[in-house]
Amino acid sequence: MFRGARRSINTSFQNKFRLKKNGALIILLFFSINLFAQSNLLEKTISVDFRNITMYDALIQIEKKAGLYFSYDNQFIKNQKRLSFSAQNRTVREILDLILDNNYHYIINNNKIVIRKKEQQYIVIHGRFLDNTDQKPIEYVTVYEPELKIGTMSNDQGNFSIKIPLTCQIRLQVRRVSYYDTLITIDTKSTTPLQIGLTPKISHEEPVTVRTIERHWLAKTVIGTRQKFNSLNLKNYFYKRKFQFGFWPGFGTKNALKGQQENFISFNLLGGYTAQVDAVEIGGLFNIVQKHAHAVQIGGMFNTVGGKVTGLQIAGLYNYAGNNVKGLQIGGLINMNRADNKGVQIGGIYNHNQNFKGLQIGGLTNSSREINKGVQISGMLNTASTIGKGLQLAGVVNNVEAINGAQISGLINISKKTNGFQLGMINISDSLNGVSLGPINYSRNGKHALSVSVQENNQLNLSYKSGSHAIYNIVQTGVINTVSSGKYYIFGYGLGTEWQSGKKVTMAMELVSLFYSGPKKFNTDYSNICLQPLVLVQLKKDIQLFAGPRLQYQLPVYQHSNEFYNGFQKSSILLKQGANTTLNLGFNVGVNIF
């Protein structure tokens, strides 16, 4: 009885075991077949012929021909990219690798292929630079991968560490001022730190000079020694970037090449140091550019550019350009340019250029070596070496070596050679070919004379005549004693012109406005305008005698009648009498002393 029961139990157990074993085999076979079928999705052979179609349309065609579906992120795969490609009897995997540049891997999910970008693998390279002559460590060595734009510098012990994307072959450039350049090929399988010897340059070449921008006081203040050495090491290496964001030069980045970037757009939270800007640069405090700045540059306090500036440059305090400027430059205090400027320059205090063409406006001072077709306007002082065609307008002083144009100032105009016009209280010119207007004028080749004259009414005049022979200024004082009105003092201003009529004879025409006041109380109720043609005869080198008629028009008087001022017309011929005006003819005779 027990034997039968035992045999029945064994048989039941064996049947159950066989059932489980067969089920496991069936499940395993099912998954194997399914896995094989899925892997075959990438190994399906198809033929394609793409002729200038988009990436999206190309993937649709592959889906239809291979009987599958793609899933991908269009941030990495550009659907609108156009391509032309033909392949016969190639696997789906091969075609995808070719049109996607082998930068993606594929995950199979049922009848769908998920396309994902390959994650970049990196290698960290450690090493040390030593001098081949004495085996001492070398600091400030720049080591970089030029194609990937990744670099670093050695520390004071010569050590460096650089993280590089793992590629088939890695070649590092090594540069250091006063050492020969070196190229290193990296064995990506080795983890041993490198020992790299550099050979010093022994030559009679001129010492290395620091770039203009690194010598600037602002660059010296904010750019560290490492960055300065890096710029010297990489003086001929630059690369382009569409956009860069910075906080402070050398802060927050391990890439030693950042200062060598030529950026299309650059934004610096506080300040930045870059190679070049081609569109827009904005800095919260300052911007420092090694080469050129194009389009727009705005700095909260400073803009400093080693090369050219083209477009708009605005700084709250100070703009500097080491080369030509073309456009509009606005500095809250100072604009300083080491070369030429063509455009408009506005400085709150001071503007400086070498050669200038355009409009220069300074709150206090403008300075240029040469101005050609330009205007200087300042609150105090304008200076220039030469002005080809232009205008100087200053509140106090204009000073130029030579000008072909005009000088207008509130006080003094100074020019060694003037071909044009001067207007000021004092005009000084060694050589004058034009007109100087103002109370005091001096020109070595012009007219300057002290004149003493007397009129028919016993009026005694003392005049200073200065300017050019074409137009000269007359500052006149005098005194007259009248029986009816008493003693009066005279002051006035006028203009004159003269021309040579013979070897020793000169003709002149003068127009003078005179005011008369009594000695006790200043009162100019009586005044007149005199037109006096003169004949001048040269007696000696420094002495001229002159004489001529004098047409005197008495301006209207209001405090007294015409009779009260009859003494002023003594011995003259009355031509016309008005209610409070008269027109008289008299004469004038005197001597000019040079």
Image: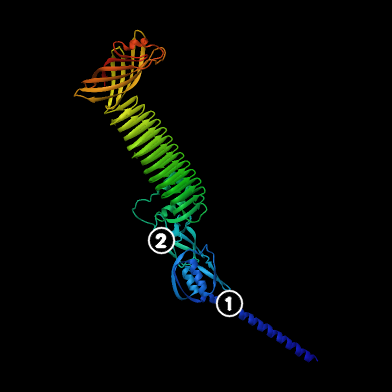
Q: Is residue 79 visible?
A: yes
> Is 487 located above or below residue 378 in the figure?
above
State the separation of the CA atoms marked 2 and 1.
52 Å
Q: Residue at x 27, y 22 (%)?
A: 509
Q: Secondary structure at mark 1?
A: helix
Residue 416 percent coordinates (x, y): 30, 32
Q: Quadrant of residue 171?
A: bottom left
Neighbourhood count class around disc 2 (C-alpha, 10 Å): few under 14, some 14–19, many 20 upward:
some
Residue 193 percent coordinates (x, y): 49, 63
> Is 187 located above or below residue 416 in the figure?
below
> Is 191 located above or below residue 350 in the figure?
below
Residue 369 percent coordinates (x, y): 35, 39
Q: Residue at x 49, y 44 (%)?
A: 300
* Three-letter residue code for mark 1: Leu
Q: Quadrant of residue 417?
A: top left
**Left or right of 279 on screen, residue 427:** left
Residue matched to label 2:
182
The single residue placed furthest to the top in the displayed view is 483
